[in-house]
């Protein structure tokens, strides 16, 4: 079964803003452009699931040409008190603590990468292999964690799987064998 993992379009948030779990909408121009560019790569008869956040759901609905199922386990990481602030304005000691323990550190009031990995992994374990392809529209963090899992990398190494806004990855998921077949596909 083919699973198409798609990152939401660029948002309307000012550049440099930390907005993991904030429900910020996609930039309307980028949304239209990304939907038009991605549409030819979406297989007929595909099933869709999306993060419930507007920036992901809007792209999923544009590609599906209608409402789609959502799952909160696909939401981006909760950055706690960092949400809505510029990355450059975050306390240096908190950024340093995160860098010292990438997987285990949780921003104040937020979640760690390992905690996010547990909820994303819980979702992944429930993906049923079917004949119809699956299109998943979500966020960079959850998509990186899926790629890390598929390739056998620990959650702490998931940042190595950078996926650009509005780009797609392809996973071949079959009983007994799962392969990351493409990354940052346009």
Image (tube, rainbow, N blue to C red):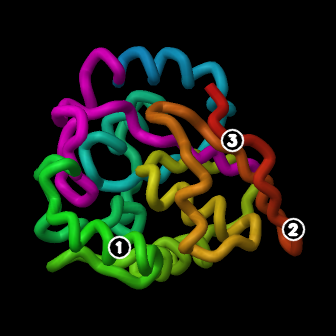
- The residue that mark 1 highlights is 98
Q: Position of residue 77 (x, y in %)?
A: 33, 65
Q: Which residue is mark 3?
A: 183
Task: Check the image and report above or below for 27 versus 21.
Answer: above
Q: Is residue 95 magenta?
A: no
- Choose between 73 and 164: the one closer to the eye: 164
Q: Residue at x 56, y 22 (%)?
A: 39
Q: Is residue 111 left or right of residue 13?
A: right
Work out how far the residue at label 3 is from the one at label 1, CA to CA, in angstroms.
Answer: 26 Å
Q: Quadrant of the N terminus?
A: bottom right
Q: Position of residue 172 (x, y in %)?
A: 79, 53
Q: Name the residue tied to disc 2.
A: 177
Q: Which residue is painted at 42% across and 15% down in the image?
A: 33
Q: Bounds of the magenta span?
A: 1-30
Q: Is residue 119 visible?
A: no
Please tell me which of labels 3 and 1 falls first in the chain. 1
Residue 41: horizontal and vertical position, in percent?
66, 26
Taking depth in this image into account, of 61 and 81 the one nearest to the observer is 81
Q: CA distance from mark 2 to mark 3?
A: 18 Å
In the image, residue 119 above or below residue 14: below
Give the camera-side residue of 84 and 89.
89
Query: What is the crowding at mark 3: few (fewer than 14 residues within 10 Å), some, or many (at least 20)?
Result: some
């Amino acid at each position: 079964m083919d699973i198409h993992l798609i990152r939401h379009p660029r948002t309307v948030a000012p550049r440099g803003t930390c907005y993991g779990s904030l429900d910020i909408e996609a930039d309307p121009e980028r949304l239209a452009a990304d939907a038009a560019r991605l549409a030819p790569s979406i297989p007929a008869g595909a099933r869709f699931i999306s993060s419930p956040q507007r920036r992901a759901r809007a792209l999923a609905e544009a590609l599906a040409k209608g409402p789609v199922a959502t799952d909160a386990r696909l939401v981006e990481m909760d950055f706690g008190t960092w949400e809505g602030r510029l990355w450059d304005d975050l306390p240096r000691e908190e950024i340093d603590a995160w860098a010292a323990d990438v997987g285990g550190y949780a921003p104040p009031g937020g979640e760690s990468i390992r905690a996010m990995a547990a909820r994303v992994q819980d979702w992944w374990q429930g993906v049923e292999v079917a004949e119809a392809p699956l299109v998943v529209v979500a966020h960079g963090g959850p998509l990186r964690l899926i790629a890390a899992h598929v390739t056998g990398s620990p959650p702490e190494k998931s940042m190595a799987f950078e996926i650009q806004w509005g780009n797609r990855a392809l996973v071949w998921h079959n009983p007994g064998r799962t392969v990351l077949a493409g990354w940052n596909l346009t």
